Image: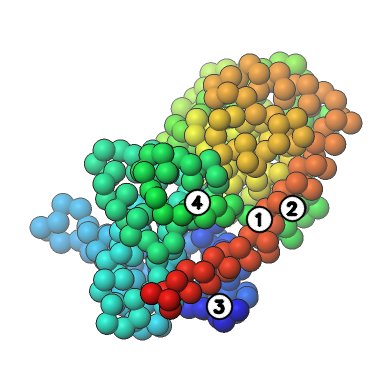
Amino acid sequence: MDKLKIGITCYPVAGGSGIVATELGIKLAERGHNVHFIAYDLPFRLQTFRPNLFFHEVDTVSYQLFKYPPYTLTLAAKMAEISCEYHLDILHVHYAIPHATAAFLARQMTAHCCAPRIITTLHGTDITLVGADKSFYDITRFSIKSSDGITAVSKYLADETIREFKIEKHIEVIPNFIDTERFNPCTTCCGREEFAEPHEKLLCHISNFRPVKRAMDVIQIFERVHKKLPARLLLIGEGPDTMLVRRIVKKNGLADKVTFLGSKAKVEDVLPLVDLFLCPSEEESFGLAALEALGCGVPVIGSSGTGLVEVVSHGVDGYLYPVADTQAMADAAIALLSDDFNLNEFKKRATENAHEKFNAEKVVDHYEQYYCRVMEEKSEA
Ligand code: GMT
């Protein structure tokens, strides 16, 4: 295919949408496309120099008159400037609010030169939590509808978007992905002895510790497991519930069994050491952290009725139960961790399934094909 000039906007922090956008940008640049990240900070996983990859920082302007810096406007202005300067073909925005709105403004502003095509990738909370808030509803719907292409990271999320926002345009489902060279059971740079004794099982949870992740359920599940068999828990990530979790861990006498690792950019260094990943979220449009765990050979126990059903196969490489059913999740964890033969089978199938269904090459091919389709529609218009 022809090489494209693509602008990518995302939240540069340690969240799933920013990680997917960054990993996609890296892969596209490796394939020879010119990729321009436009964001208020260098994305979390984009710390090294790479050919064909550029970063353009969006300033946040403060002025006495402004109670809040008008970030959406500075972002739109930067998108327009970079689009004209580099003749971008596509502005690919991750997370609808406010990125799709800023892209809409940028396209209007650049109508005289390049007017890039806008592709909006929906990630989850932009639809299920934030976007459906009354004050955001109309502008989110307008911005999604105004995009030239819309993708969602799961069928679950595409269906939710259609139901919630009555979108008639086609939404292309393009799942999240992993680099199988990095997310596999064999590559780790640390030793298991750093986190657990040989006879102990190692459980893990990775998230931004927002209430939607139900980190307290993780502790409840772990406590039940720990009563039945020797085990330790690794917690990776930081967020509003971290303090509460620390307090409960101490109060329940688990402090020497739970390790808080904080935010880590390279979770793949640790995941291969883990026996079981816990993801009991209230809502999960996909569950990138769960996929990264599976890729590293770690079975997942999580919540059914969410996008996790498209990632984890119940009874094959993990178990899914209704949100808040910590008893069922703990029982399944105890049974799995008590049977080494079965645990190893789950581990093997976790890697096989994750690598087969969600490998980066296959998913990035899908994005490229979708870009071509959206570009063809432009030339026909
Ligand atoms: O999970 C979060 O709170 C972060 C959020 C984000 O936008 O960064 O994650 C969402 O996007 C991820 C990447 O597509 C998905 O894997 C997560 O499931 C989704 N989170 C939720 O739906 C709660």
Q: Specify the amino acid type for callout 3.
A: His
Instruction: Give the spatial CA distance, label 2 vs label 4.
Output: 20 Å
In the rendered image, residue 58, in percent from the top left (x then y), is placed at 33, 67
C-beta proximity under 8 Å, tags 1 and 4: no
Question: Which image quadrant is residue 275 in?
Answer: top right
C-beta proximity under 8 Å, tags 3 and 4: no
User: Comparing marks 1 and 4, which lies closer to the viewer?
Assistant: 4
Q: Give the mark nearer the N terminus: 1 vs 4.
A: 4
Q: Give the numbered dot on residue 33.
A: 3
Instruction: Give the spatial CA distance, label 3 vs label 1.
Output: 20 Å
C-beta proximity under 8 Å, tags 3 and 1: no
Q: Secondary structure at mark 1?
A: loop
Q: Specify the amino acid type for callout 1.
A: Ile
At 48% across and 53% down in the image, what residue appears? 171
Q: Mark 2 Cα within 10 Å, few/some/many (few <14, many 20+)?
A: many
Q: Specify the amino acid type for callout 4.
A: Ala
Q: Specify the amino acid type for callout 2.
A: His
Instruction: Give the spatial CA distance, label 1 vs label 4.
Output: 16 Å
Q: Is residue 41 visible?
A: no
In the picture of the structure, the residue carrying the numbered disc 1 is 178
At 51% across and 78% down in the image, what residue appears? 4
Nearest to the observer: residue 227 or residue 93: 93
In the picture of the structure, the residue carrying the numbered disc 4 is 152
At 63% across and 55% down in the image, what residue appears? 177
In the rendered image, residue 9, in percent from the top left (x then y), is placed at 42, 63
Instruction: Give the spatial CA distance, label 3 vs label 4.
Output: 22 Å
User: Comparing marks 2 and 4, which lies closer to the viewer?
Assistant: 4
C-beta proximity under 8 Å, tags 1 and 2: yes
Viewport quadrant of the C terminus? bottom left
From this view, report whether residue 10 is shown above or below residue 293: below
